[in-house]
Image: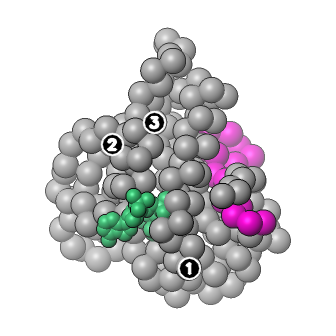
Amino acid sequence: MKIKLKLPKISDTKEFREIFNDKEVGKQLSGYKYPLHFSEAKKKLQEIITQNKKGDYYEFAIIYNNKFVGLVCLGKPSKDKKIFTLGYAVGRKYWNKGIATKSVKKIVNFGFSKLKLNKIVADNDEDNLASAKVLEKNGFKFVKRVEKKRRKTDKKVRVLFWEKKNLKGGTST
Ligand SMILES: CC(C)(COP(=O)(O)OP(=O)(O)OC[C@H]1O[C@@H](n2cnc3c(N)ncnc32)[C@H](O)[C@@H]1OP(=O)(O)O)[C@@H](O)C(=O)NCCC(=O)NCCS
């Protein structure tokens, strides 16, 4: 399977909207609402592009068979910038093909070898079994389970926290 990560461009808005204008994708993510109109999608993508340029934030388009099918990112750095939080999403019609698993593998390698991170952390709702599977398949270890209130729905959810340490050593602070 051919997966590439590239920086998103504003000309990707149509494909970006196709992925995120979907209740099933958006409900697992903060910062996305449904329906997502074209102008909102463009604004959101522009925010991502701007954040990427500022540094300390790395959000890549996932390219599968030359198509933009999702996003994977490292953000929310710790103060010393040695720990980043992982995020990912794939368009529904591309689910269960191993795309998220492979994309996470690529961004984890980038985080450990290029950014020299000490640790990458991630979290997912307990009922998001596909997301947990992606983390497990990438060697993330379960850390804790915390009950939280979802801001969007006011619903109580259990959130699982995960981490992967850089065993080859990041840099000490
Ligand atoms: C989570 C998500 C990124 C997974 O993407 P994907 O490309 O389908 O993931 P992969 O194909 O690499 O792996 C999914 C795994 O979960 C498994 N899976 C899928 N649905 C499942 C379910 N309901 N129960 C148990 N396992 C499930 C698949 O079988 C696969 O495992 P396998 O390779 O061992 O068969 C995708 O579902 C998504 O974008 N969801 C909405 C956004 C989201 O939840 N992002 C993560 C926020 S924490």
> What residue does disc 1 label?
93
Q: Which residues are magenta?
A: 50-66
Residue 88 vs residue 53, the one in the foreground? 88
> What residue does disc 2 label?
162
Q: Earlier in the sequence, mark 1 or mark 3?
A: 1
Q: CA distance from mark 3 to mark 2?
A: 9 Å
What's the residue type where badge 1 is placed? Lys
Q: Are marks 1 and 2 in contact (CB under 8 Å)?
A: no
**Helix, strand or loop status at disc 2:** strand
Q: Residue at x 26, y 51 (%)?
A: 160
Q: Is 78 situated left or right of 14 in this image?
A: left
Q: Are marks 3 and 2 in contact (CB under 8 Å)?
A: no
Residue 135 vs residue 34, the one in the foreground? 135
Res 23 label: none
> What residue does disc 3 label?
120
Q: Residue at x 48, y 47 (%)?
A: 86
